[in-house]
């Protein structure tokens, strides 16, 4: 595993949902804040996004939009201010359950792919936490070709359900999320994690820890993996990640343990071995110190969160 894959896997719950929708005439739809991430890709026409607390965003054909923190928002056929949005907007679920657009498409209709990812936001990896509330990826000739290919494949699956779509759709939606995060990292002009993963020394140490978190890593072994001295690794890693290598490793091991408690029925002894702790007691003590609760209580609370979500 790598950092981006692990960051997503640690918080992902269940299968994402998606729709291909067509909007006709004058329309204004409201999505309240939610626990998860949302996306929108404009396939035809143009529209506007008004995120809660943010400036309106104009969206054209091929534009992709990621709302990684479940920010409430309004999507409309034309620019709207907050007061107008509150007056005109129809709740998204009510709108989706309505009669829908007219059967015969019109030239001014807007078609879009949209959907949600269910996420456990209680333990976000800092890479995901650093994402802005709105990630706008405009359609540019030659830009982000992998993302464009994923969008085309997803549009095809949503446009015509074919054999195997129950497996293809979730896989394509996961691919879309990865490509949108990659595109943001490629375009980011600031932020911790684009710099950390772009630095060969820090990236090598992160790759080693995420590939085998249970290994008996030390600063010396990580420095050897990165091909630098221990002081050089410590200086560069701490400056870019915000904590020393071994502190990050401890945090990641416990975060991984929390994910295993949430997603598996493995015993604490099995989980301790998988994340590099010598005994269930050692893991339990470290877990409670980091998260303020016992592994058993965390497992119960995670099951409740998953049911409610």
Image (cartoon, rainbow, N blue to C red):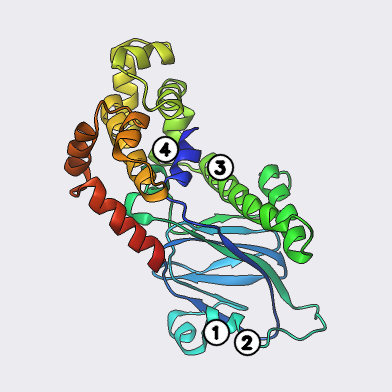
The residue to which callout 1 is attached is 94
Mark nearest the camera among 4 and 2 is 2
Pointer 1 local density, CA inside 10 Å: few below 14, some 14–19, many at least 20:
few
Which badge, 1 or 3, is on the more N-terminal residue? 1
Q: Disc number at residue 98? A: 2
Question: Image point 77% across, 65% down: which residue?
Answer: 159
Residue 143 appearing in the image: no
Q: Which quadrant would residue 126 be assigned to in this image? A: top left
Residue nearest the observer in this picture, 258 or 5: 258
Q: CA separation, marks 4 and 1?
A: 38 Å
The residue to which callout 4 is attached is 193
For label 1, the SS is helix
Q: Disc number at residue 206? A: none
Are the two marked residues, 1 and 2, in contact with CB atoms closer than 8 angstroms?
A: yes
Relative to 210, residue 28 above or below = below
For label 4, the SS is helix
Q: CA separation, marks 4 and 2?
A: 42 Å
Pointer 2 local density, CA inside 10 Å: few below 14, some 14–19, many at least 20:
few
Q: CA separation, marks 4 and 3?
A: 11 Å
Q: CA separation, marks 1 and 3?
A: 33 Å
| 111 horizontally vs 277: left or right | right
* Residue 203 horizontal/vertical position (percent): 45, 26
* Residue 181 horizontal/vertical position (percent): 53, 46
Are the two marked residues, 2 and 3, in contact with CB atoms closer than 8 angstroms?
A: no
Q: CA separation, marks 2 and 3?
A: 36 Å
Pointer 3 local density, CA inside 10 Å: few below 14, some 14–19, many at least 20:
some
Question: Image point 47% across, 41% down: which residue?
Answer: 189
The residue to which callout 3 is attached is 182
| 164 horizontally vs 208: left or right | right
| 134 horizontally vs 308: left or right | right
Q: CA separation, marks 1 and 2?
A: 6 Å
For label 2, the SS is loop
């Amino acid at each position: 595993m790598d950092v981006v894959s692990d960051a997503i896997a640690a918080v992902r719950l269940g299968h994402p949902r998606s729709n291909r929708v067509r909007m006709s005439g004058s329309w204004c739809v409201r999505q309240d804040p939610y626990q998860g991430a949302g996306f929108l890709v404009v396939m035809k026409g143009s529209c506007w996004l008004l995120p809660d607390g943010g400036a309106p965003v104009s969206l054209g054909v091929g534009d992709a939009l990621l709302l990684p923190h479940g920010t409430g928002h309004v999507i409309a056929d034309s620019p709207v201010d907050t007061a107008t949005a509150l007056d005109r907007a129809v709740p998204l679920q009510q709108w989706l359950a309505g009669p829908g657009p007219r059967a015969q498409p019109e030239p001014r209709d807007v078609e879009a792919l949209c959907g949600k990812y269910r996420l456990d936001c209680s333990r976000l990896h800092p890479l995901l936490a650093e994402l802005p509330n709105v990630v706008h990826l405009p359609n540019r000739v030659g830009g982000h070709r992998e993302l464009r290919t994923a969008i085309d494949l997803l549009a095809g699956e949503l446009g015509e359900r074919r054999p195997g779509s129950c497996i293809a759709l979730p896989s394509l939606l996961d691919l879309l999320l990865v490509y949108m995060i990659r595109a943001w990292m490629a375009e980011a002009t600031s932020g911790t994690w684009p710099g950390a993963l772009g630095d060969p020394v820090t990236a090598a140490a992160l790759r080693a820890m995420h590939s085998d978190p249970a290994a008996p890593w030390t600063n010396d072994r990580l420095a050897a993996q990165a091909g630098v001295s221990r002081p050089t690794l410590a200086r560069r890693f701490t400056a870019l990640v915000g904590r020393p290598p071994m502190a990050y490793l401890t945090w990641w091991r416990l975060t991984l343990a929390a994910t295993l408690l949430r997603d598996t029925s493995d015993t604490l002894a099995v989980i301790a071995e998988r994340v590099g702790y010598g005994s269930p007691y050692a893991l339990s003590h470290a877990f409670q110190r980091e998260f303020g609760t016992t592994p058993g209580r965390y497992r119960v609370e995670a099951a409740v969160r998953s049911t409610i979500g």
